[in-house]
């Protein structure tokens, strides 16, 4: 997930949060976990061209990893716009849509369809972890996008996609976001004042102890 | 003019031999509380920076990795998970106390078999040429006296095609952020260091060494001068930290 210019700290944090949520959901679904373990050793690349979001998914026997940056061999690569992914999610026959739709597929399609099935069945809240990391607005939008990709029946609206795109451009322009910096600056000043107060209190205490000892 | 070679120890000028000893003292004194301080200092965000480092390493099952200045072993543990039983991870640190804390922690967490612990100086790595697929150094290069020497030593032990990752404090791109960060690292850190680790001098040194460290483009040039190719860097958290990467041709 590396839109040009977006601070990798943000996207990495979002993926870390999602990965944790995904693995928590898998822990509650032993059958899904077993099935996913059968796909261990593969790397799936999910590349959205508009907006630009790349996510790499690596199933493992114990843990499934989500990466935003990966340059090793990929088993299955699927590329398209968010609208193309939404079409796949809403399709009654995902396999046919994969082959006949607008998505560009490279590599093995069978494991990809299996993966989509496993994740689509999970009771997974994409939203809470993203909201925590990205703040309410952006997190909600990104979660909708991901939900559209994995759960049948939910299609991302075009206004949602437009908002997401705007968010990414906005973020890319301001690195780091000005608001965040100002908040941080305020926090630091407050912390400094508290440190100074604490220091003078310590000093006073020390004096009192010293005079009590005499 | 004296011909004794001097170097920076924080903002103080000291001679080169003395620096290694002073750095060792800093880390001996904080080793036990290092993880806690690390979390407090960066609000836990160092975990995200390290995660990004792992992603850019592209390390795979069966590969061999050297983590220099590995300290208490965060990166080494992640690498050991990824390379698996057929791979090899070496955690190297110049400081025995840090290495011991790291070893105890990782063995406690069940790591063994593919993980080795070696006391070594980044400038003189005790490994044969072409040994590793990946070499990493996180928050360690700024403590090294002769950085050019260390970078050449890292290049030597890498296999051709292997990659070096340097994660280090750098220069914030936004002046307001830089100012805030200075306030934080010079006034808040040493004080927290005294409360938590009982040692404010060490954290004063850490804050100063962050400021003395080469900025993004200077470090990029140093990687190139050492012989790395396809060098690049990524600013993290607005340049508070940067991740540099270079390859051995
Ligand atoms: C700030 S800690 C970083 C630890 C760990 N990599 C992390 O990111 O949490 C710096 C470490 O560098 C080690 N160090 C300092 N100078 C070194 C040198 N010349 N060679 C190897 N390690 C060194 C210290 O002992 C210390 O453990």
Image (cartoon, coloured by chain):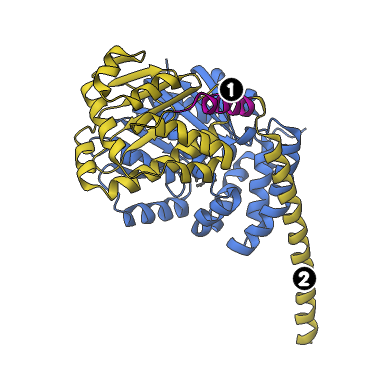
- Tell me the shade of chain B: blue
Please check the rendered image and state whether residue A170 is part of the magenta-colored stretch, yes or no. Answer: yes
> Badge 2 is on which residue?
A201
Q: Quadrant of the C terminus of chain B?
A: top left
Confirm whether residue B86 shows in the render.
yes
Marks 1 and 2 share the same chain: no
**Exactly how many numbered labels are in the figure?**
2
Please check the rendered image and state whether residue B232 is part of the magenta-colored stretch, yes or no. Answer: no
Residue that appears at 28% across and 50% down: A28
Most foreground residue, B248 or A84: A84
Q: Residues within 10 Å of mark 2 (few under 14, many from 20)?
A: few
Examine the residues drawn in magenta and state their main secondary structure. Answer: helix
Report the span colored magenta.
Answer: A156-172
How far apart are the two marked residues, 1 and 2, measured between alpha carbons? 46 Å
- The image shows residue B79 at horizontal and vertical percentages of 36, 38
Q: Is residue B63 above or below residue A28?
A: above
Q: Is residue B233 above or below residue B5?
A: above
Tell us which disc is closer to us: 1 or 2: 2
Q: Quadrant of the N terminus of chain B?
A: top right
Q: Which chain is yellow?
A: A
When asked about the image quadrant of residue A154, the answer is top left
Residue A116 is tagged as: none
When asked about the image quadrant of residue A48, the answer is top left
Residue B220 is tagged as: 1
- The image shows residue B246 at horizontal and vertical percentages of 48, 22
């Amino acid at each position: 997930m590396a839109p040009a210019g977006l601070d990798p700290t943000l996207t990495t944090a979002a993926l870390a949060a999602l990965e944790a949520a995904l693995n928590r959901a898998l822990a509650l679904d032993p059958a899904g976990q077993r099935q996913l373990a059968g796909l261990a050793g593969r790397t799936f690349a999910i590349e959205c061209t508009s907006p630009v979001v790349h996510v790499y998914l690596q199933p493992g026997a114990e843990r499934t990893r989500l990466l935003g940056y990966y340059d090793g061999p990929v088993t299955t690569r699927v590329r398209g716009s968010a609208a193309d992914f939404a079409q796949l999610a809403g399709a009654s026959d995902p396999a046919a849509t994969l082959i006949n739709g607008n998505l560009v597929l490279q590599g093995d399609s069978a494991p990809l369809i299996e993966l989509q099935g496993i994740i689509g069945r999970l009771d997974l809240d994409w939203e809470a972890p993203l909201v925590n990391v990205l703040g309410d607005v952006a997190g909600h939008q990104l979660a909708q996008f991901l939900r559209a990709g994995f759960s049948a029946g939910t299609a991302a609206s075009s206004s949602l996609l437009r908002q997401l795109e705007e968010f990414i451009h906005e973020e890319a322009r301001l690195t780091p976001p000005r608001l965040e910096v100002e908040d941080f600056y305020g926090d630091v000043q407050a912390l400094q004042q508290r440190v100074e107060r604490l220091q003078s209190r310590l000093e006073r205490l020390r004096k009192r102890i010293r005079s009590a000892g005499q | 003019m004296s011909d004794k070679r001097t170097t920076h120890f924080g903002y103080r000028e000291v001679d080169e031999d003395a620096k290694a000893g002073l750095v060792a003292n800093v880390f001996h004194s904080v080793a036990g509380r290092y993880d806690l301080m690390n979390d407090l200092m960066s609000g836990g965000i160092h975990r995200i920076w390290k995660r990004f480092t792992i992603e850019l390493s592209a390390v795979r099952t069966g590969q061999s990795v050297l983590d220099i200045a590995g300290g208490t072993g965060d990166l080494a543990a992640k690498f050991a998970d990824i390379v698996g039983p057929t791979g090899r991870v070496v955690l190297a640190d110049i400081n025995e106390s840090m290495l011991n804390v790291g070893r105890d922690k990782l063995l406690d967490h069940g790591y063994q078999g593919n993980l080795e612990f070696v006391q070594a100086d980044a400038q003189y790595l005790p490994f044969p040429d072409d040994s590793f697929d990946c070499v990493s150094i996180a928050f360690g290069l700024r403590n090294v006296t002769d950085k050019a020497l260390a970078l050449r030593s890292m290049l030597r032990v890498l296999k051709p095609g292997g990659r070096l990752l340097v994660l280090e404090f750098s220069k914030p791109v936004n002046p307001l952020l830089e100012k805030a960060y200075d306030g934080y690292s010079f006034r808040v850190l040493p004080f927290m260091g005294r409360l938590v680790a009982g040692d404010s001098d060490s954290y004063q040194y850490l804050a100063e060494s962050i400021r003395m460290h080469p900025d993004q483009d200077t470090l990029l040039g140093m990687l190139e001068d050492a012989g790395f190719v396809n060098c690049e860097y990524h600013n993290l958290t607005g340049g508070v930290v940067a991740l540099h990467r270079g390859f051995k041709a």
